[in-house]
Amino acid sequence: MPPALDTRALTKRYDDGTLALENFDLTIPEGSFFGLLGPNGAGKTTLINAVCNLIRVTAGEILIFGQPTTALDARRQVGLAEQDINLDRFLSVRETLIYHGGYFGMEKDDAEGRADEMIDAFDLRAKADVRTPKLSGGMRRRVLLARALMHRPRLVILDEPTAGVDFELRTELWRYIRQLHSEGTTILLTTHYLDEAETLCEEIALIRGGRLIARDSADGLRERFGADSLADVYVKAMATAP
Amino acid sequence: MTGFRWLARREVLRVSKLWTQTVLAPVLSSLLFILVFGLSLGDRIRDIDGFAYSEFIVPGLIAMAMVQAAYNNNASTIYQARSDRYVNDVLSAPMHPWQMNLGFIVGGFVRALMIGTALTLCAIPLTHVPLEQPLALALAVVLSLVLFSALGTVVGIFAEQWDHTAFISNVLILPLAFVGGVFYSVSLLPSPWEELSHFNPIFYLVQAMRYGFLGESDVSPVLALGVTAALAIPTYLWAQWLFSSGRKLKA
Ligand SMILES: Nc1ncnc2c1ncn2[C@@H]1O[C@H](COP(=O)(O)OP(=O)(O)OP(=O)(O)O)[C@@H](O)[C@H]1O
Ligand SMILES: [Mg+2]
């Protein structure tokens, strides 16, 4: 069984010369709940954008369930909720979901049914016909997540999904993501909340300056760095990194 | 093909949600031109090529309204999608670059066709403009709209600020359209203005449209359609290349 995500010697240099990823190798097995941790500017979003065809990769290879990102079938397997909310300002909540489903190859009936499911799952019923610019921040975050999951992706990528989210929504989200994972969906999550990573993720990768520093389970990392908590691990890892 | 259909639908939905701006406003302003220049001043201007002035200006005015709408539509839809970054939802989707390009073009195309149809339906009873060469007209419309929708896409992709899209429209398209023989036959111009007009790309498009309506034009319809096609194809391919290479669309 090919891994959900496999990057080989992935390098991204932006046009202004910033080297955001350097020879980055990462394999995420299918079915895992994977956390990506690192300070601001570490390259987390760059990695995600490379996987989702949103940046031009400088060098290296990306395989999604064994297929290159140029294969349309590979892209259909991935659902992305970006770090910054990017909803179509002309569409209502329901339309946002249905059109996204359509872009990802769903037929009309299927997309409409699934959109209703998502609207209920994310408690958006009251706002279903409201245009997205008129939603509150938390509501937009919900729509963003619902959209990422709309086409039933096998690999779900969540870039700081809980940043700026209230306690209630965060707990709800955790529950929802866990359920998805228990159904076999592979999850790649970035977060700056170490407790979140510790609670949710089976495996964690620490990255800094576009390089992978360590990857293991939370327990494994603690042992390796001789630390009591993931926070300690994080501090030690970042301090020792070149 | 599903992704492409939904993208095209999204573009048409945007046009229809904003229909007062996207369709009604340009129709009304072109109708004003037809009424003011054609019908009220028209009596004082002598016939051109055997056509009443009000009839003569209709094809050019419709052409102008259509190509500007196609351009504006695509420049603004792409610019907005880029600046709010929801274009990422399309870029990450399982669609071929050509499907993305064509999907956006459909929006400008449909909007311009709605305007053109509405104007034609108003202009026929008002001015009795004929429809001599429907096939040539259809070809002229398709080529002109591909050209200007694709140009809108290209500018929408390159624009760093909103103003840039309007700049091209105000500084390039509008002036060239005004001196492109919409309001007069260039054969009436003194030298060198007549000759210079032949370097204006919009002149050929206006001529092609005029031939379609009136069956007459300042240059042969084959030349007019040929030049329009010679502009439309590379512009379309340019837009296509921007989607396939990711230049400017992707960091
Ligand atoms: N479009 C861009 N052009 C140039 N440099 C960029 C661009 N996007 C990101 N970078 C740079 O690439 C590096 C990695 O950025 P990235 O957004 O991947 O970090 P991140 O790990 O997601 O950080 P954060 O936790 O703040 O979201 C940074 O130095 C950033 O400034
Ligand atoms: Mg980031």
Image (cartoon, coloured by chain):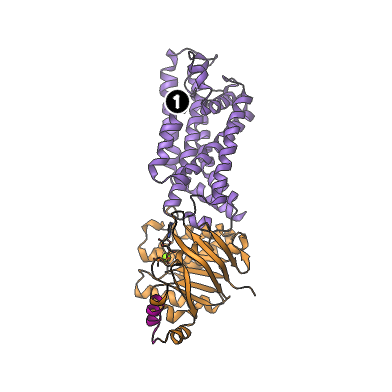
Amino acid marked by disc 1: Phe
Give the residue drawn at x 44%, y 37%: B24
- Helix, strand or loop at label 1? It is helix
Q: How many numbered badges does the structure rendering display?
A: 1
For chain B, what colour was chosen?
purple
Give the residue drawn at x 56%, y 73%: A27
For chain A, what colour was chosen?
orange
**Percent position (x, y) of residue A129?**
43, 58
Residue B65 or residue A53, whichever sits in front: A53
Magenta region: which residues?
A227-238
Give the residue drawn at x 41%, y 56%: A131
**Is disc 1's CB within 8 Å of ligand 1?**
no
Residue A186 or residue A140, whichever sits in front: A186
**Percent position (x, y) of residue A179?**
50, 78
10 Å neighbourhood of mark 1: few (<14), some, or many (≥20)?
some
Question: In the rendered image of this protein, does residue B141 appear above or below residue A213?
Answer: above
**Percent position (x, y) of residue A43?**
45, 66
Is there any visible trace of residue B53 in the rendered image?
Answer: yes
Q: Let me know if residue B87 is in the magenta part.
A: no
Question: In the rendered image of this protein, does residue B204 appear above or below residue B251?
Answer: above
Residue B88 or residue A35, whichever sits in front: A35
**Percent position (x, y) of residue A144?**
44, 64
Residue A206 or residue B14, whichever sits in front: A206
Find ligand 1 in the image and state its quadrant: bottom left
Is there any visible trace of residue A204 in the rendered image?
Answer: no
Q: Which residue is mark 1?
A: B178
Name the dominant secondary structure of the magenta segment.
Answer: helix
Give the residue drawn at x 64%, y 30%: B135
Chain for numbered disc 1: B
In the displayed orientation, state which residue is furthest to the front: A242
